[in-house]
């Protein structure tokens, strides 16, 4: 039985949340020693509660903090290819507990303004209390943000579309487009062709016909709600902007499957 069939079976039986909680506690137990060591060596590093870390990454404090710094540098390198980052407004859409955006002021510089938004109240509350120099706002699952039209220069969303229904893909894309300035860029990641190995035969047939594949039966937006994105679907979604880059990274044995990267520009 394929992993996709197992996943769909668990969803059908209403056991996917339970399975996810088991995975959470197993990961927490496995990393208990290295996490204790990290906290003792880095007492000044502010870390969110474990489940918030798990939702956005994995419960490994060392990787969570240091790899997120590297991700911030990696993102910045991509941004700089397409936009001058002097005095810009940068938004982390779906920021979670601030894993990446907490590092951007040091990586890019304080000439920019930084914003983070997420539908998880616990994440936004933690960020607002613990991460300075960044403006955080809670949003709902529905596509509505507090920002004015043409407000930000750069928007990035790491694995956010991967947890939304087809309708919310369109709704959220239109909302992000609304707040993005002309000549501004979006950096978004999706589960593309690398993830075809996870699909069942029925899902694969749908995917190969450029249809979005969604695994639901859980709360939309949760980490267990999963969407898979064929190129044809994404190009249709981005039909009113310039696609600057579509990057597919070849998988490496023993590592997580890399998501596709889409960098687009508002005209």
Image (cartoon, helix red, strand yellow):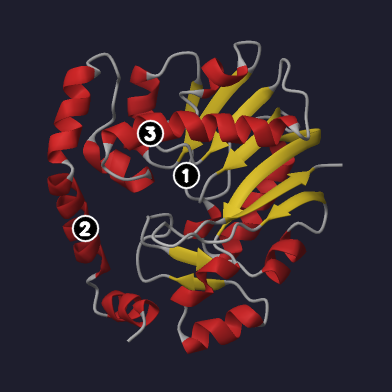
Left/right of residue 220 with respect to residue 251 in the rendered view: left
Q: How much space separates mark 2 and mark 3, taking CA atoms?
A: 20 Å
Q: Earlier in the sequence, mark 1 or mark 2?
A: 2
Give the number of the disc on residue 23.
2
Image quarter of the N terminus:
bottom left
Left/right of residue 85 with respect to residue 142 in the rendered view: right
Pick whichever, 227 or 174, lies toward us.
Answer: 227
Residue at 59% x, 69% y is 193
Residue 158, x across and y down, in percent:
53, 45
Pick whichever, 24 or 133, lies toward us.
Answer: 24
Q: Is residue 82 above or below residue 253?
A: above
Residue at the outermost top position: 110
Residue 159, x across and y down, in percent:
51, 51
Q: Earlier in the sequence, mark 2 or mark 3?
A: 2
To which residue does mark 3 refer? 97
Residue at 75% x, 63% y is 235
Q: Is residue 199 above or below residue 50?
A: below
Residue at 61% x, 39% y is 156
To which residue does mark 1 refer? 140
Residue at the outermost right position: 267
Q: Is residue 99 visible?
A: no
Of tags 2 and 3, the one toward the viewer is 2
Q: How much space separates mark 1 and mark 2, taking CA atoms?
A: 27 Å
The secondary structure type at the circle numbered 3 is: loop
Q: Is residue 15 visible?
A: yes
């Amino acid at each position: 039985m394929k992993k996709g069939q197992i996943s769909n079976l668990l969803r059908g039986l209403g056991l996917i949340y339970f399975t996810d909680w088991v995975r959470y506690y197993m990961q927490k137990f496995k990393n208990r020693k290295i996490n204790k060591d990290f906290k003792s060596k880095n007492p000044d590093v502010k870390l969110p509660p474990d489940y918030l870390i798990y939702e956005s990454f994995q419960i490994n404090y060392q990787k969570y903090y240091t790899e997120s710094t590297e991700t911030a540098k990696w993102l910045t390198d991509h941004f700089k290819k397409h936009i001058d980052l002097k005095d810009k407004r940068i938004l982390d859409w779906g920021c979670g507990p601030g894993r990446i955006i907490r590092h951007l002021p040091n990586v890019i510089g304080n000439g920019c303004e930084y914003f983070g938004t997420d539908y998880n109240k616990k994440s936004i509350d933690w960020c607002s209390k613990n991460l300075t120099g960044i403006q955080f706002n809670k949003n709902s699952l529905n596509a509505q943000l507090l920002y004015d039209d043409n407000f930000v220069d750069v928007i990035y969303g790491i694995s956010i579309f991967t947890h939304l229904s087809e309708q919310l893909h369109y709704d959220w894309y239109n909302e992000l487009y609304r707040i993005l300035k002309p000549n501004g860029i979006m950096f978004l990641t999706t589960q593309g062709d690398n993830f075809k190995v996870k699909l069942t035969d029925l899902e694969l047939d749908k995917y190969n016909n450029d249809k979005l594949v969604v695994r639901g039966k859980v709360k939309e937006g949760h980490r267990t709600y999963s969407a898979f994105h064929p190129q044809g679907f994404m190009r249709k979604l981005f039909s009113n902007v310039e696609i600057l880059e579509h990057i597919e990274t070849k998988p490496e044995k023993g590592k997580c499957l890399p998501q596709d990267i889409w960098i687009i520009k508002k005209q």
